[in-house]
Image (cartoon, helix red, strand yellow):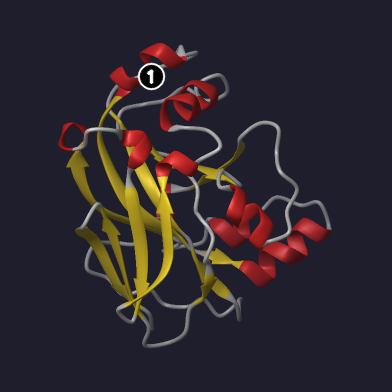
Amino acid sequence: MKLICIGRNYADHIEELANERPTDPVVFIKPDSAVLPKEQDFYIPDFSEDVHYEVEVLVKIKKVGKHIDEKFAHKYYDEVGLGIDFTARDLQSKLKEKGLPWEKAKGFDGAAVIGKWLPKSDFEDLNNLNFSLLKNTVPVQQGNTGLMLWKIDELISYVSRYFMLKKGDIIFTGTPAGVGRIQTNDYLSGVLEGKELFSVKIK
């Protein structure tokens, strides 16, 4: 299983971090060791003083695919979910300044929260999903998949040009504005179309 993550897929988040708007999807990968085990708290790593939450809609790939045409991409997944791409922002900034890869800031142990999965048939339009992240019961991020620069099927097609997709692979489709720092004793929960799909305590 690999975690394929898309960066800079919401215009408001690009502006929020003062990043350049990309002409193609920004793709990076987290190792499977980044997945936070179910029911486990997230421990802030000792190498960062500025870990940020980034809530994202997730897609689980159900079969092998390569060079997938966008019009057939919907055949490669049946489930969608919600998760967090934890980011050591201070470390990421240092790496970006030097033109180095982001993996240490994005792929560390526990950096990927994966919530419950829901059948995509539960939703009328995957390009109009409302989702949010609550910190200590207060909404801090709110997004809609209709605002993504590249929609789910476009992402699957694009990614499959470079990486063979396999059953169980998960695509993190990008985060909207509102990212922020976590602190010890914070409680985060993610909601997709009114359903809570994950919760996590910060230690």
Image quadrant in which you'd find residue 195:
bottom left
Q: Quadrant of the N terminus?
A: top left
The relative height of residue 105 versus residue 99 in the rendered view (above or below) is: below
* 20 and 159: which is toward the camera: 20
Q: Looking at the image, which residue is at 46% across and 11% down?
A: 69
Nearer to us in this view, 44 or 8: 8
Above-or-below relation of 140 to 164: below
Question: Residue under circle 1?
Answer: 73
Query: Residue at the spot x=63%, y=68% of the render?
Result: 89
Q: Is residue 63 left or right of residue 12?
A: left
130 vs 108: above or below: above
Q: Position of residue 45 (x, y in %)?
A: 51, 76
Q: Is residue 132 placed above or below 162 in the rendered structure?
A: below
**Which of the pair 30/197 is nearer the observer?**
197
Examine the rendering and report whether any part of residue 157 can be seen.
yes
Q: Which residue is the extreme one toward the right?
A: 98
**Which residue is farthest bottom?**
185
User: How many numbered discs?
Assistant: 1
| Residue occupying image coordinates x 21% and y 57% | 194
User: At which x and y percent is residue 133?
Assistant: 37, 65
**Secondary element type, mark 1:** helix
Identity, as a three-letter code, of the amino acid under mark 1: Ala
Q: Position of residue 74 (x, y in %)?
A: 32, 21
Residue 56 % position (x, y): 42, 52
Quadrant assignment for the C terminus: bottom left
In this picture, residue 122 sits left or right of residue 129 = left
